[in-house]
Image (cartoon, coloured by chain):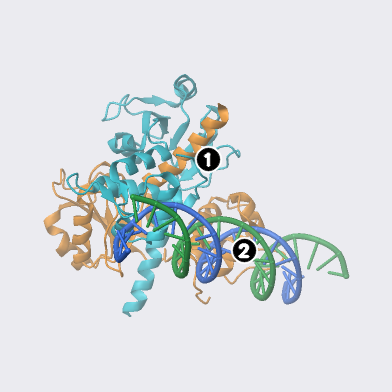
Chain colours: A cyan, B orange, C blue, D green
Amino acid sequence: MERKEISKSALKRLPGYVAYLKSIPADSSPYISATALANALGMGEVQVRKDLAMVSDGGRPKIGYLRESLIEDIEQFLGYDNTTDAVLIGAGKLGQALLGYSGFDAYGLNILAAFDIAPGAEQSDGGKPILPMSQLETYCWENKVLMGIITVPAKHAQSVCDQLIACGIKAVWNFAPTHLEVPDNILVQNENMATSLAVLSMHLQSQMKKKR
Amino acid sequence: MERKEISKSALKRLPGYVAYLKSIPADSSPYISATALANALGMGEVQVRKDLAMVSDGGRPKIGYLRESLIEDIEQFLGYDNTTDAVLIGAGKLGQALLGYSGFDAYGLNILAAFDIAPGAEQSDGGKPILPMSQLETYCWENKVLMGIITVPAKHAQSVCDQLIACGIKAVWNFAPTHLEVPDNILVQNENMATSLAVLSMHLQSQMKKKR
DNA sequence: TAGATTGTTAATCGATTAACAATC
DNA sequence: TAGATTGTTAATCGATTAACAATC
């Protein structure tokens, strides 16, 4: 299918569709309508239909989409089919948790190794190498790594980020609660727990007020 | 100051301001302008000014905002001053990482205890209790817990969520990669790694295309 | 054919940006 | 006073929703 320009908001909704589609029991109907999908996820049906139209050409009136191919279409659109190799910097608790999480394959992400200023062990629980920072540069170039995951304390994040860019990395997944300064062609995606907490905190505040 | 209605997008930007303001060395000027803040974070200055106007009444022409009180104003607005107690369900790697993370106090979040179907230990590394699920309900009511953090595998997330709601919880921070069905008055905030990965994956794909 | 569903075109809504007036 | 900065009002932009036409 032809590739249209997708809005960032629509892009962010796509993984939700895949997750839901995959959770449907195999013995149910092989077809699903945008309407059904929308209801299941509590979304507007027009929105879902528009999103699906961006990634698939397969909707059939009166029937809907073939579940299997819809999943494939979205995953292909998102680039989950060709695996991305990544390195992770900062083998603390969070870093090790991500390193050990096996669910990332489903999204085409493969964390090759972790790096740390002071590696406690040579291997993670899952058997992935934990290497000293001194080896980062060689490793990245040799393995053509394009993504870096930052799980170091906030005060070291910028310096780590600069090093990653010097190693040829094009996309950074930042778990440190800090703003990173990068050149235009580099993408920083902040996994911002503080943002989520702000939303949650706000909701609880307004709940409290209602009670009183 | 009077409390205006803030947009969700603006709300999500506030934690970024606080993080940056706190990172400024104590010996620099006690004042900061919206312009300076915008430049530092790579944002539009009008946007920053509007956001700040929502939470503070203190901007002074030609001078800017007093850094200290701006931090206070935002934190108070976000409700970081009165602590929220939370329980965490699922003491796996990610769960333990969050349980052990000391940085949440800064956001007014206090994880009291973790729960798990099969607690391996009675305490986490940080000394917080890890309790069996059977004790969840009593614990929540006794401690008036309003927030639940879900770090169980996707297939158990909905059931855990239902239990939490039955325990009087009003806000759920969901780390499981799945959609949760909840009543209207309950807020679910998804910490959606899949979403972030979609954005990153997309960026790398377009980068690759340019190269070729 | 009738009806469920898709896909598209137009209208609305919300948020961002631009222009301007106010202030110290 | 002049100029930097705030805060507000109006214009633009983007995304969502509503209305409709097309299709099996």
What's the amino acid at mark 2? Arg
Q: Give the Cα distance between marks 1 and 2.
A: 25 Å
Query: Left or right of A173: which side holds B47?
Result: right
What's the amino acid at mark 1? Leu
In this rendered view, identify the residue nearer to me: A120 or A106: A106
In this rendered view, identify the residue nearer to me: B82 or D11: D11
- Residue identified by numbered label 2: B49
Q: Is residue B81 above or below residue A55?
A: below
Residue A74: image location, x then y, percent? 38, 42
Q: At x 16% / y 59%, what residue is drawn?
A: B136
For the question of whether residue A151 can be seen, the reply is no
- Quarter residue A105 falls in: top left
Q: At x 53% / y 28%, what residue is drawn?
A: A168
In this rendered view, identify the residue nearer to me: A29 or B19: A29
Q: At x 43% / y 36%, what residue is drawn?
A: A149
To which chain does the residue with label 2 belong? B
- Residue identified by numbered label 1: A187
Residue A123: image location, x then y, percent? 30, 25
Kindly give the residue lying farthest to the left in the view shown: B134
Secondary element type, mark 2: helix
CA neighbours of label 1 inside 10 A, class few (<14), some (14 to 19), many (20+):
some
